[in-house]
Image (cartoon, rainbow, N blue to C red):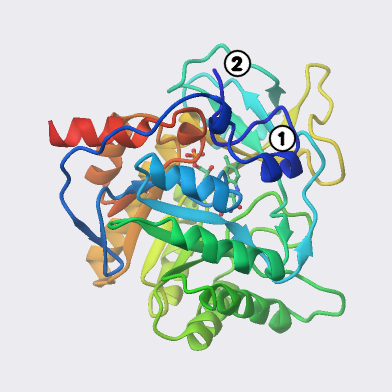
Amino acid sequence: MNPVFYDPKISYEENYKNGPPLFNANIKPLKRKKYTTYKLFGFDVNLPFGIPAGPLLNSQFMKEAFNFGFDVNHYKTQRSIIFPCNSFPNVLYVDIDGNLTIKKTKKPLIGKKSTKKSKIQFSITNSFGIPSMGPEIWQEDMKKALSYQKSGQLLIASVVGTIKNGYTEEDYYNDFAHTAMLAKETGVKVIEINLSCPNVANEGVICYTPSAVESICKKTKEKVGNIPILAKLGYFTKDQQDLLEDVVKKISPFVHGIVAINTIPAPIVDNNGLQALPGPNRLISGVCGASIKWAGIDMVRRLNLLKERFNYSYEIIGVGGMMSPVDFTDYIKAGANAVQSATGAMWNPLLAYQIEEKIYL
Ligand SMILES: Cc1cc2nc3c(=O)[nH]c(=O)nc-3n(C[C@H](O)[C@H](O)[C@H](O)COP(=O)(O)O)c2cc1C
C-alpha cells in the first residue's frame, strides 16, 4: 500500500516541504460525475465528503484534495504560535482484529512499520502534537489554499489554543478565540475548534470538561461573530452519556456544527513491549482507521438523537474509519450531514470518486 496524502516514512517537516506523495505517484484527477448540490453550514457543496483536520498540512495538500474531488476539506489544526512537531515517527500501522473497543484500548497495541491488512481494513496511530508554522506562515498559506477551492467546495480552518508560560485557564481559552480570529482574517468561511486531540502533552483532551468547552465556544463566537463555528469532539463512552449531553447543551448555542470523532487513545508499544513512539508522554497515542468506525457511527447516532430530542440546530460531520463507499452510506444513515476520511483518504486518492459513483449510478 502506498500512501498518497502523507508519507509516514519521512518526517512531518519533509512532508510539509515536499507536498503529498501523490505528486510522484502518477495518478491524475478524474472527470467528475454529474452531481447534486448539498447545503452544509449554509454553503453549497457538491459531495458532502472530504478530509478532516490532519493529513492536509498546507496549501499543496489542499490543492490536490480539491482536485481529486474531496469537496469538504480541513486545513490541519493551527496555533497562534510556532509549535514543533513530536519526534519522528509520527505514523505507525496498528493491526487490530475487528473493532478497537474501549476494552481493547486498556492493553498495549503494537505499532508497526507495515501492515498486511487491505486498503479498507487497516488502522494506524498518529501522533504529531499539533505542530504549527505560526500565523505568519499559515495565514498566507491558508489564503493560497482558499484560492484552490472550486465551485461547490469548502475549506474549513481548524484551530486550537496553546498554553503559554504564565497563562491562566482564562488566557488559554482566550487563545482558542484569538487563533480562530487569525483564521477568519484569511477569509475562510467556516472554523472548527479542535477540542479533542489526544496527542498533546500539556493541554489534555478538553472536550470532556463542559465548563471549558462552553467558555471556549462562547469566547470564539463572540470574537469571530457570524461565521459558522464547529466543535470537534472525541468519542464519549456509553457511561459518559450524561457528560455528552451536558457538553452538547453547553456548546449548542454557539456552534453550527459538531465534528466527531477524533482518534481513540491507546498505549502503543513495539515488539519488545516498549513505548513505540519516542519522547515523553507518547505511550498513549491516537488510533484511527477502520477499527474506530463503530465509535464514529455511534457518536453520530447519539448526536443526532440529542439533536432531535432537544431541537438543536447543529449539523454533524461524521469522521472515523471512513474507508469505502459503504462507510459513507452508513454515516449518512446514522444522521451525518457530511462525512470525512483521514486514514482512508491518505491511502486512496480516488475515494471521493468511488463514493460519487455509488451514489449517482
Ligand atoms: C495524519 C493525521 C493527522 C491528524 N491531525 C489532526 C489535527 O491536526 N487535528 C484534528 O482535529 N484531528 C487530527 N487528526 C484526526 C482526524 O481528523 C480524525 O478525527 C481521525 O483520524 C479519525 O478519522 P479516520 O479514522 O478517518 O482517520 C489527524 C489524523 C491523522 C491520520
Q: Earlier in the sequence, mark 1 or mark 2?
A: 2
255 up-or-down from 303: above or below:
below
Q: Nearer the viewer, residue 66 or 81?
A: 66
**Viewer-nearest of labels 1 and 2?**
2
Residue 27 lies, in percent from the top left, at: 45, 26
169 up-or-down from 258: above or below:
below
Q: Residue at x 77, y 64 (%)?
A: 82
Q: Secondary structure at mark 2?
A: loop
Residue 252 lies, in percent from the top left, at: 39, 74
Instruction: Tell me where residue 155 sits by quadrant.
Output: bottom left
59 up-or-down from 135: above or below:
above
Tell whether 317 sits left or right of 330. right
94 up-or-down from 77: above or below:
above
Residue 158 appears in the figure: no
Q: Which residue matches tag 1?
A: 267
Tell whether 79 sits left or right of 299. right
Residue type at tag 1: Pro
Q: Secondary structure at mark 1?
A: strand
Tell whether 62 sits left or right of 36. right
Picture mark count: 2
Q: Residue at x 14, y 36 (%)?
A: 360
- Which quadrant of the figure contains the C terminus? top left
- Rate crowding at label 2 as few (under 14), some (14 to 19) or many (20 or more) other CA atoms within 10 Å: some
Q: Is label 2's Cβ within 8 Å of ligand 1?
A: no
Residue type at tag 2: Thr
Q: Residue at x 63, y 25 (%)?
A: 93
Q: Is label 1's Cβ within 8 Å of ligand 1?
A: no
Q: Which residue matches tag 2?
A: 115
Residue 211 lies, in percent from the top left, at: 57, 77
Residue 279 lies, in percent from the top left, at: 87, 42
Q: Nearer the viewer, residue 136 or 125?
A: 136
